Image: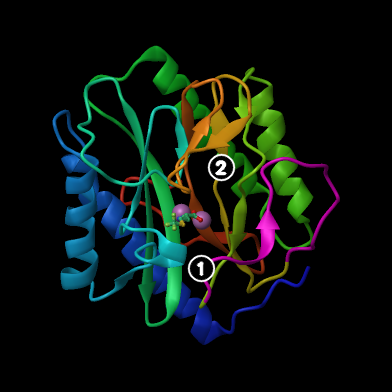
Amino acid sequence: MTISIKTPTEQDAMRLAGRLTADVLDMIGPYVQPGVSTDELDRICHDFIVNVQHAIPAPLNYRGFPKSICTSVNHVVCHGIPGDRILKSGDIVNVDITVIKDGFHGDSSRMFFVGKGTVQGERVVRASYEGLWKGIAQAKPGNQLGDIGHAIQTFVEAQDLSIVREYCGHGIGRVFHEDPQVLHYGEPHTGAELHPGQTFTIEPMVNIGKRHVRLLPDGWTVVTRDHSLSAQWEHTILITDSGCEVLTLGANEKR
Ligand code: MF3
Ligand code: CO
Ligand code: CO
């Protein structure tokens, strides 16, 4: 598996695309309230990306995907299609944004609590967030992809939660999904070696119940087989000489 190395100019383009992606998520947060439909969230994000950022929402028409963002509610694992569903207090929703600016992609997703959080919702949302950062901590030159997956899997499974295996992080650049596949499980000291200039996403999906998933007949929506709650966070990162740079950090996310 070859992982492309971005030139310094390309890295700057990735920084810009990443910042715009984070800006969309910062913008949409206050709109995620009881009573809003996922279609409204899609429309607000679409208009912001196109009219304010002068950028392109990558999901729209990507392999036939019909909307500009993904909204995955409760037991939806990923790739939920915005529609007339009205969010209600206690729901958890993942909003996944991919923006193309000057030909380069930024890709990030976050979980939002609708109204009042539930104990189970908070548990799975926190585990997926902390799990993502366990993976990011392993993203540095000299390490291998398996180190990232292993760190995430170990952390999540120690809490009796499960990691989805069918979907993974990915290389990203001019292409939305390029090599490598970034698995969220695995063995240390295995897989491709990390080198400065590589850009890829880490985006663990964590289920409260079993790890197994099912694809709905719409061809996109992925749900947990046992209908247990699922949560996901995603960042796009750049491997640097000393570690990595998170290109999609939110305004309230300085670590
Ligand atoms: N943004 C998703 C990812 O993290 C991919 C969505 S593909 C779409 O890789 F077509 F559903 F938008
Ligand atoms: Co992604
Ligand atoms: Co994404």
Mark 1 residue's CB less than 8 Å from ligand 1: yes
Q: Residues within 10 Å of mark 2 (few under 14, many from 20)?
A: many
Alpha-carbon span between mark 1 and mark 2? 22 Å
Q: Secondary structure at mark 1?
A: loop
Numbered disc in front, either 1 or 2: 1
Circle 2 is placed at which residue position?
Answer: 133
Percent x, y of residue 84:
20, 39
Circle 1 is placed at which residue position?
Answer: 176
Residue most extreme to the top: 119
Q: Nearer the viewer, residue 144 or 215?
A: 215
Q: Residues within 10 Å of mark 1 (few under 14, many from 20)?
A: some
Percent x, y of residue 29:
24, 43
Percent x, y of residue 36:
15, 36
Residue 239 can be seen, yes or no: no
Q: What amino acid is labelled 1 in the image?
A: Phe
Q: Nearer the viewer, residue 9 or 177?
A: 177
Q: What amino acid is labelled 2 in the image?
A: Trp
The span shown in magenta is 175-194
